[in-house]
Image: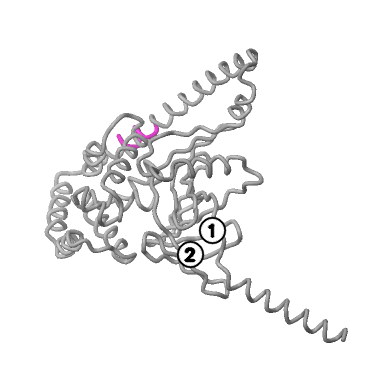
Amino acid sequence: MKNLSSILIVILTIIACKGKDDTEFDIHGVWTLECIHISDGNDYVYDEHNRVLQVFADSTYYVGRKYSEPGRFEFEPTYSGRYKLIGKGGGEWLYFEDGKRHAFSVVNDSVINIEDVGRTYEWHKMDGSKNPNVGDVLSIVEKNKEAWDEDKTTYVISERERSLESDRQNLVVAILCIVLAFALFIYHTRNVFREKARIEQQFKQIQKEIEERPKVVREALMTVEDEFLNSEFYLSSRKRISNGEQFKKADWEEIERQVNSAYPGFTNHLFSLFPMSQLEMQTCLLIKMRVSTTDIANTLNKSTSAISTMRSRLYGKVFHDKGGAKEWDEFILSL
């Protein structure tokens, strides 16, 4: 009987292990975009204080941007969408985002890779037991998920502000916090000006390169642009967009190649100014192709207001100044 019991235990253990391989990977939680692995080998690693953040909850994902300093965590909603993760068994999964299939791989419990348009997006999961900001982010998502694409609020989370909630009547603490807040404001403002100066210098360099191109080069580029805008690829792409067709991974790769061929260094210039997400880059590519806001929204399966909000935010983040979607479009067309 002892041998029979041992055999049964072994069999049940094997069945349990096999069943575990067939379960879905637990993607729920808060993830940060750590790195974009580009097919040409020029990987882009995000600054630890400024990263794209994504929350997977049920069948919807919520994307925002986080800006962190010692003791301070800022979070801004950007856009949301639908996703589905299906376990195939044997440690393999299928991942769909807004109805589009993407290659998906699990490095470990806290690192995943999602591939799209010739790039691999490396996401790291934030540990809720070690990072108290996880609970705050999840709370923000839960309270604002119905109007996430339209939310322009900047949420500031910090340990100090948490403590102030329970100690508001203490005058000494209030005075210290005012002084600290002022010091943080000065520190933050100085960093903003430094970043603004860096971006302005980068933008001036780009403009200088464009303006100093020899006449023969400028004329050649104008010819290339005319050929691109009258090419079979451009006309067929515009027709597909007007017909409401959805682009696949290979389509986006070809669009990026064609745009960079007509406008040399276009995507590299954008990445040098600001770390853009996949959706933001696709929007910029379509703007460069003179696609209307309505058609951009239909192609990317977003609302026109969400696309307009994204463009306005990009202008503000790049130039640290007030500007609308129109100003961002003018900038993109000038590159």
Q: What residue type is labelled 1?
A: Ile
First along the sequence among labels 1 and 2: 1
Q: In this view, does 187 lie to the left or right of 238?
A: right
Question: Mark 1 and mark 2: span between their CA atoms?
Answer: 8 Å
Residue occupied by mark 2: 85
Asked whether 276 falls inside the magenta stretch, the response is no
Question: Residue 302 at x, y = what percent?
Answer: 30, 52
Mark 2: few/some/many CA within 10 Å (<14, 14-19, 20+) = some
Asked whether 200 falls inside the magenta stretch, the response is yes
Circles 1 and 2: CB atoms closer than 8 Å: yes
Tell me the magenta residue range.
Answer: 198-204
Q: In which quarter of the image is residue 308?
A: top left
The structure residue drawn at horizontal position 61% and vertical position 27%, both measured from the top left corner, is 160
Vertical side of 172 occupied by 295: above or below: below
Question: Residue 266 at x, y = what percent?
Answer: 29, 49
Q: Is residue 314 left or right of residue 286?
A: right
SS label for mark 2: strand
Vertical side of 71 occupied by 122: above or below: below
Residue occupied by mark 1: 27
Q: Which amino acid does label 2 sit on?
A: Leu
Q: Quadrant of residue 118?
A: bottom left
Question: Residue 27 at x, y = what percent?
Answer: 54, 58
Question: Residue 129 at x, y = what percent?
Answer: 66, 46
